[in-house]
Amino acid sequence: MNTSAFTRHFQASRLTALALAALSACGGGADVATVEPALAPSYHLAPVQPTEPGDIDADGQQASAHAAPLSISVSGRAAALSTARRVPADLQAALADTAASGPTVGALAAARVATVYTPAQIRAAYGFAQLPAASTANQGVYQGSGQTLYIIDAYHNPNIANDLAVFNLKFGLPTCGNLNITATTHLPLPSAVAGSGCNFAVVYAATAGSTPIGALSSKAPIVNKGWVTESSLDVQWAHAIAPMARIVLIEAASSLVSDLMAAVDLANKMGPGVVSMSFGAHEFNYSSMQYWGTPLGGSKMSYVASNGDGASQVNWPAVDARVLAVGGTTLQWNGSSRSETVWSSTGGAISTQVPVPAYQAGIRKPGDPSTAGAKIFRGSTDVAFNADPYSGQYVYVTPSAATGGTGWVCAGGTSIAAPQWAGLVGIGNAVRAASSKAPLGLLQTSLYTAIAKTASVYAANLSDIKIGSNGSCGAMCNASVNYDLPTGLGTPNTAPLVQFLAAY
C-alpha cells in the first residue's frame, strides 16, 4: 500500500471507529472493535507496595547484583488489591472466590511471596553484567552507545523525566541528557554518536487523521492513568539494559490502533533504531491487520512487542512476522544462578491469520497440521524475558492523584520484557556498528536460522525454558525442549549472544 492510500485508510477507519463508538455509547450496539480497537498496555503489578529500595547501588557499583532479591509477603484485603492496580488474572480469580466465601484476602495472599529485582540483579541474571564495561576504546557500545531506542506509548506522562531521574539516582545508572526535539525539528534526526552517552526526549505524534501520517505535534496528548505506569516502566527498563543508548519516548494521541501506528511511523521517519511496543489486542479484534501493520517495515529498523498477558492467545502487533514477539517467564535469581519457568499468564499461541514466516519454516510447532500442503501459521512468540509480577522489577512512578502514580511498584507483564529485549537489540546494533556492519533489522532470521538450528550454539546463546505452561491446552500450552509457544526460543544468555550477533 502506498503512503497516500495508507493515509486515506487511516483517516477513513478512524472516522468510522469514532462514529461507531458514539453509536455504541448511545446504545446503538455497534462493535467498534471490529473496525479499530483501542490497544491495551500489557503490564501488571504485584498486589503489594514495596518499600523504597535501599541505596546499595546508588554509587554505581551495582553491589546488589550478587544478592538475593527482596521478598515481600503479599497480604491485605480485597479492596487493597483492586483491578485498578492491574492485579494478575490468577489472583483476581482467587480474590473473587474468597470474596464469595466471606474471609479476608489475608489468608489467601499471605501464602504468596513477591520478589522484586533491581536493575543490577536483572543485568547479572541475564548476563549483561558480563559484557565489557564502557571504555574510551569501545566507546560504550556494549551499553548501547550510538543507538536509538524508540518507546511507543499512548497518552501523556507529565512526570516521565522525573520518574527516570529518580530511578537512575537510586540504582546508580547513568543520567540522561535532554534531547530537544520540537514539532519543527527536521527529520530524520542526526545519528546518535558512539561514546556520547544517554540522551532522552519525549515527543508527541500527530493523530492518524493528520497529514502526513507520522508527523510531530506540538500538542501533548491527554493524561491517561492506565498508561502512565506503562511509559515509566518502558523507559526505565530500556535504559537499565542499554544505559548509554539514546531514548525517544513517542506519545501517541490515543490508544487507537491508527494513532499508535502513526507513532511507529514517526519513529521510522526519525531514523534507524529499535522500536519497542508494549501493548496489543487479540488478533481477532479487527479485520484489517495488514493495513495496521504497514509501518512495521522501516529501513534499518527492528520492531519488538510484548506478547500479551492473557495466557494462551495471540496478540497483535507481536504476531506480525516483522516483529520480535516477547513472551514471559517467572525468574528465580539467588545472586549466582538463574532458573526460569513459563509465566502462567504469558501470551503465546498459533496465529490463525499470519502465515508461517520463512524464519519459522524450519521448526515444528505444537499444533502444526501434519497433512501435506496444509496451511501453516506463525507461532506468536519468538523469545522471552522475566515478566511475572511476582518475580517483578522495581519501577518508580511519581506519586500523583492526577496520574495515578504511587511511588515504587513491583512491576511485571510482557510489557516489561519487550523494552529489555529492545535494549539488547540496540546493544547488538551498537557492537555491529563498531565493525561497520549493518543493523540487525529482522533479528528472527539469525535467531532461528543461525542459532537455533545448531544445538551447541543454541545452548550457548539462549536459555531454553522447559517447565511450565500458559494454559490447559496440552502441548500447545506447555514448555518443551527447543521451541514452544509460551516462550519461543527462550531467554537470552546475553554476553555470548551479543558476541554472536556482532560476528553474524
Image: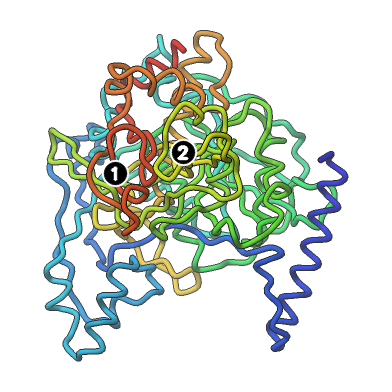
Please name the residue shown 69% across and 58% down the image: 287
In the image, what residue type sits under mark 2? Ser
Residue 87 location, x and y as percent?
A: 34, 68
Q: Nearer the viewer, mark 1 or mark 2?
A: 2
Label located before the other in sequence (1 or 2): 2
Q: Is residue 159 above or below residue 108?
A: above
Residue 239 in which image quadrant: top left
Query: Is the residue marked by circle 2 packed among few (<14), some (14-19), or many (20+) residues within 10 Å?
Result: few
Q: Which residue is mark 1?
A: 479
Q: Nearer the viewer, residue 278 or 92?
A: 92
Residue 204 location, x and y as percent?
A: 67, 52
In the image, what residue type sits under mark 1? Ala
Q: Which residue is mark 2?
A: 370
Where disc 1 sits, the SS reads loop
Q: Is residue 259 left or right of residue 304?
A: right
Residue 280 numbered tag: none
Label 1 to label 2: alpha-carbon separation: 21 Å
Q: Is residue 169 above or below residue 14?
A: above
Please name the residue shown 32% across and 28% down the image: 462
Please name the residue shown 24% across and 45% down the image: 341
Q: Is residue 474 left or right of residue 338?
A: right
Mark 1 in CB contact with mark 2 (< 8 angstroms)? no
Residue 181 location, x and y as percent?
A: 67, 41
Q: Nearer the viewer, residue 325 or 56?
A: 325
